Amino acid sequence: MKGCQQFGGVWTEKKLKCLKKYLCAYTTALKNKPFELVYIDAFAGTGYRTQNPDPNEFNDLLPGFSDVEVQEFLKGSARIALEIEPQFDHYYFIEQNKKHFEELTKLRNSFPRLSNRINLINEDSNNYLIEICTNWNWKKRRAILFLDPYGMNVNWTTVESIAKTEAIDMWYLFPLGVAVNRLLKKDGEICDAWKTKLDTIFGTSNWYTAFYKNEEQESLFEDDPHVQKTATYIKIKNFFLKRLQEEFADVSSNPLVLLNSRGCPLYLFCFAASNKKGAPIAIRIAKNILDHMGKDGPQLQN
Ligand SMILES: C[S@@+](CC[C@H](N)C(=O)[O-])C[C@H]1O[C@@H](n2cnc3c(N)ncnc32)[C@H](O)[C@@H]1O
């Protein structure tokens, strides 16, 4: 099928279940409050996804199209959000890929009663998010933002502007194992392009001292420092959660660890609330959902 979007397995299912539960709880809790409620899906995809019976999760890094005929079509995040009751006042679906975007536009026909609430944006989500976070008046608005990239597509400057709105609750699929840990090479010899990528996702270059140590080693040259990677999945998780805590009113301390079929960590599914007053309840709900979805699930190993 042309333009189909194929990714993920059990972990995709878990991520979308968390999102769905939170969206329901959110619109129910805020339905009688004097806010305009907005759902923003910044990596919206096509609206549906295809389940490969034997998925190779690492293909997720390649935002290409599959020409394989796949039998099972499942709902993607955009479709899930449009089915939530009570409804949101506005839906913003951002998708950069032209073919994915064409598929996404068909959603409007599937939900005619919501068509005047649906906004479709064929742009880079970092640019668009910074624009709306900076230019919209957030006093009377509250939003849930879903950041669901394949890899390291979210810039820290975007995260900063989201937090500054003090109105957005953010779910962020952080590419812990699919990307970040892979770029942190064992010998610390990281090329400039990868360093820039890591600086951009963390919003700092302090990751280097956090994830590497200099070891004096016996060598012909006595002062020759030997660099060793100390980063573990847990260390990267803690570093990233700390970065979020520096910006947001509060951050859920129990992100969901999503593994591939071989048991390797792929992503961390994180939640952060930007409104001080709303944060305690938002975090309580998100934490419960994450605990529930993560129970009996994997813990990160050092
Ligand atoms: C993992 S998929 C999203 C899946 C979707 N959330 C769902 O549940 O169906 C990531 C999507 O982000 C899009 N994308 C990648 N980089 C982007 C960017 N900078 N801005 C907007 N969309 C982007 C890709 O084309 C792809 O469709």
Image (cartoon, rainbow, N blue to C red):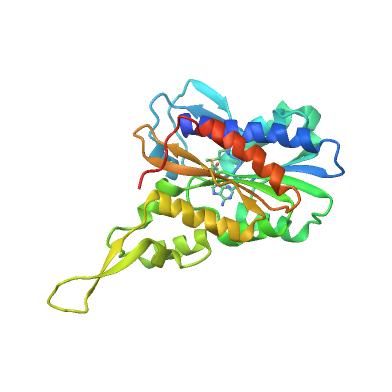
- The answer to whether residue 103 is seen in the rendering is no
Residue 277 in the image: state x and y as whole percent. 76, 51
Residue for point 68% across, 32% down = 107
In the image, residue 206 sits, relative to residue 251, either above or below, namely below
Q: Dividing the image into four equal quarters, which quarter contains ligand 1? A: top right
Q: 142 or 218: which is nearer to us?
A: 218
- Pick the residue in front: 40 or 174: 174
141 versus 218 height, above or below = above
Q: Is residue 282 left or right of residue 182?
A: right
Residue 110 visible in image: yes
Counting every numbered tag in the picture gives 0
Residue 104 percent across, percent down from the top left: 64, 36
Residue 114 rendering spot, x and y as whole percentages: 78, 32
From the viewer's side, name the closer residue of 39 and 221.
Answer: 221
Q: Toward which corner of the image does residue 97 lie, by quadrant? A: top right
Report the side of 4 relative to 234 (left or right): right
**Quadrant position of residue 86:** top right
Please give left or right for residue 22 compared with residue 155 in the image: right
Vertically, is 219 above or below 107?
below
Q: Which residue is pictured at 65% across the width and 44% down the height?
A: 283
Question: Residue at image x 46%, y 41%?
Answer: 64
**Furthest residue toward top:** 71
**Horizontal placement of 190 versus 275: left or right?**
left
